Amino acid sequence: MVIESVGLDFGKTALKAVKFRRALSGRESIDYFYQSIPTGFHDTADPERKAGLLRNFLWKNDLYGKPVVTALPCEDLFIRTLSLPFHNLKTLTEIIPHEVENLIPMSLDDVTIGSTVLSRSASRDRHQAGTSDVLVTAVPKQRVTDHLKLLASADLDPSAVNIDGLALFSVSEFLKRACRSMPGDLSIIDIGASKTILCLIQDGLPRMVRTIPWGGQDLTQALAVRESCSWQEAERMKRTMEAKELELWLEPLIRDIRLTLHQFESETKARIRHCWVSGGGAKLRDLPLLLPCRFGLTPAGPRQGFDTDAPKAFAIALGLSTHPKLVGPRWRDRRQASAPAADLRRAPETTAQQATATRRDKKLVVAGIVLLCLAAIGDLFVWVAEGERRVNGLKEAVHEEFLRHFGSGEFAGDEVEQARIRLGTVKKQLDVLTVRQDRILPLLSSLATEVPATIMFKIRELTAEGGAVHLEAETDSFDAIERVKTSLANAPGFDSVAVSDSHLGAEPNRIIFRLTIGGPQP
């Protein structure tokens, strides 16, 4: 995957950018962009003019649409290195705000706290977790807001906001990839127009970052006063003079750097032995050699990876472009840990913010649970209503089938139970026919065919019992009874035919009689 990132350094006298690109093959390329800024521009220009300058610079160099990393100056932050007896990152995040609260002159509600774990050391006691060295930064929220607002005015949304001092450390890490002999102890002195940034590296990690309010403009001002000349003339003289000739005016810077080195050595009990000078001040003749000699340090040269092509004036911009969040190690260096770097834009929240967020999260959780319960109750209600509707539909279907097969019943009730009773009755009636079926059914068939068709014969009741059929019928005369008896007696399918009773009916010309017909015995 092709990686592209841009480091943007918005300085006092120049606007610098570095575009870093790593191809799929691992080949890396770096492009530098520079635009000078008039003297005093930051003091007189309003935010709209600054945004316009930045917008034109980005458009002219085709830097829009790529991940951009910017930086806040060290003098706007509170930076401390803390040693805490914890290794767990979550525990460190919870403890750091309480530790920082007594070290800064501001409330935790007014600052954004960031932290970078530098190193972890194991404890000799296996029951203890050991210690972690953490570089802690605290920046006023308003400062971060103003910085992001300025970038937003230029239609720029940075991927990360680093610290200029840590960007210098990123430069050393970038150069270390090409030169394995890079010293683990190094002092980087970046001399800018209005300030000097000092980054002290020990054991390959940034241990101290400091800003000294002295830069190249102070040297130009001192020369202009000493020589009674214009600013432009003093600037030209500064670039032509050797460092030894400027040593008198460099004394304030040398004194502050020496005090910083002594403080560092007294606190860490370790001594830094190498020095690299970067920034615009590194262009002064022999200055990169003079400063290390004044502190008893060895100038970092080609043997340590700092050759003449090292981007001295673009050191901060290069460090920003290689932010670990955007540019990781190459595939062959995956085992190496990511270099420490800050991202003030997404720094962890302070304790007060965490408490507010916790309360808000609890309310959201409760509201979510209530909504889930309501949704479950609503789903249950819909499920019950749908089931009841289906049951009613099935009941109506059963009732319709019952009416179609059995007709309307005498009693209202369970149709299934009524159907069971009706089927039992029919079954009993069929049992009469099925018992000795080989005699009863032929007997009834012969009865239906042997009765003369000319005789009016109406059966009123018929009973099958064993192998005989008892019937009560009516006809129009006693002669018809004799004729029926004679016809059935002569038929081959009957063994016996007997008339047990005959009498007049209630209606005229109606003779009621009882007839018993016996079938053949098995």
Image (cartoon, helix red, strand yellow):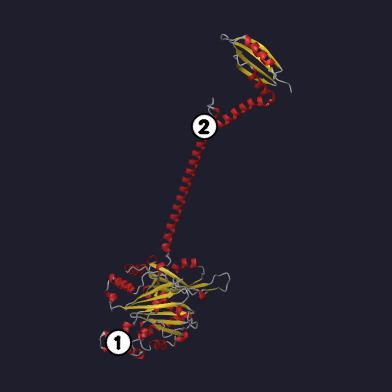
Q: Name the residue under label 1.
A: 236
User: Among all residues in the image, which is located at the extreme right?
Assistant: 522
**For this rendering, which residue is in front, 133 or 373?**
373
Assess disc 2: are there few (<14), some (14-19) or many (≥20) residues with their C-alpha within 10 Å of its C-alpha.
some
Residue 458's image quarter? top right
Left or right: residue 60 versus residue 511 is left
Residue 240 drawn above or below residue 481: below
State which tag comes first along the sequence, 2 or 1: 1
Residue 400's tag is 2
Residue 342 drawn above or below residue 312: above
Local SS, label 2? helix
Local SS, label 1? helix
Report the amino acid beneath label 1: Arg
Question: Picture coordinates of residue 146 (x, y %)?
Answer: 33, 68
**For this rendering, which residue is in front, 379 or 427?**
427
Residue 209 appears anywhere in the view: no
Question: Picture coordinates of residue 6 (x, y %)?
Answer: 39, 73
Residue 433's image quarter? top right
Q: Residue at x 66, y 17 (%)?
A: 470
Residue 492's image quarter? top right
Question: Picture coordinates of residue 102 (x, y %)?
Answer: 42, 70
Quarter that holds the C terminus: top right
